[in-house]
Image: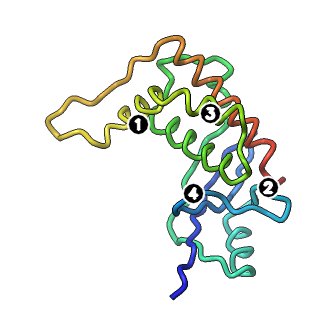
């Protein structure tokens, strides 16, 4: 039996527009690329589904996951620790990692990514996925250095995204 790759629709909110892309998970997570090694982007889920049907790609029937890169870009312009949304920031970080992995990587994002393991752990634990019902939720405290480093990481990731997504 051949394993069939299942793709999941993701909505990227980017520069005031919605882009629909196909993400997959496996040994290595990534995104569907076009013949130019850029992220295949569609203006609607229906257009993505049509493309998938024409190319025999299996698309999950679940709702699209939303990644608000505009919110991240706005935050990078004036990074404030109290505005760090652990769930959104962690999801965007993971997606940018998958983007750089799919497209061949961004040296500036990859080096910052490896350097910021502590910040990643804070975002992860700030989602409070692993707490018992009787435990207090974890709310990370961010140093100014961590905030600047996160803004630098996300700025590098956004540059990679802008350079990698098809119009």
Q: Is residue 84 left or right of residue 22?
A: left
Secondary structure under the numbered disc 4 in the rendered image: loop
Q: Residues within 10 Å of mark 4 (few under 14, many from 20)?
A: some
Disc 3, SS: helix
Q: Which residue is mark 1?
A: 124
Separation of residues labelled 3 and 4 (CA atoms): 23 Å
Marks 2 and 3, how far apart at CA: 23 Å
> Would you name the residue on which mark 3 appears?
71
Q: In the image, what residue occupies the spot 68% across and 59% down?
A: 21
Q: Earlier in the sequence, mark 1 or mark 3?
A: 3
Q: Is residue 137 left or right of residue 25?
A: left
User: Which residue in the structure is indicated by mark 2?
Assistant: 38
Q: Secondary structure at mark 2?
A: loop
User: Which is nearer the N-term, disc 1 or disc 4?
Assistant: 4
Q: Which residue is mark 4?
A: 29
Q: Residues within 10 Å of mark 2 (few under 14, many from 20)?
A: some
């Amino acid at each position: 039996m051949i394993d069939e790759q299942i793709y999941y629709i993701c909505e990227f909110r980017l520069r005031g527009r919605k882009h629909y892309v196909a993400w997959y998970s496996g040994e290595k997570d990534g995104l569907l690329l076009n013949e130019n090694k850029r992220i295949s982007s569609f203006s609607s889920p229906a257009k993505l589904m049509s493309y998938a049907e024409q190319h025999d790609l299996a698309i999950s029937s679940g709702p699209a996951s939303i990644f608000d890169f505009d919110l991240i870009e706005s935050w990078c312009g004036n990074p404030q620790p109290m505005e760090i949304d652990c769930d959104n920031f962690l999801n965007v970080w993971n997606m940018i990692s998958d983007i750089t992995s799919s497209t061949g990587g961004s040296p500036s994002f990859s080096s910052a990514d490896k350097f910021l393991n502590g910040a990643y752990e804070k975002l992860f634990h700030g989602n409070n996925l692993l707490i018992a019902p009787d435990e207090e939720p974890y709310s990370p405290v961010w140093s100014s250095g961590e905030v600047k480093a996160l803004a630098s990481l996300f700025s590098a990731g956004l540059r990679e995204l802008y350079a990698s997504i098809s119009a």
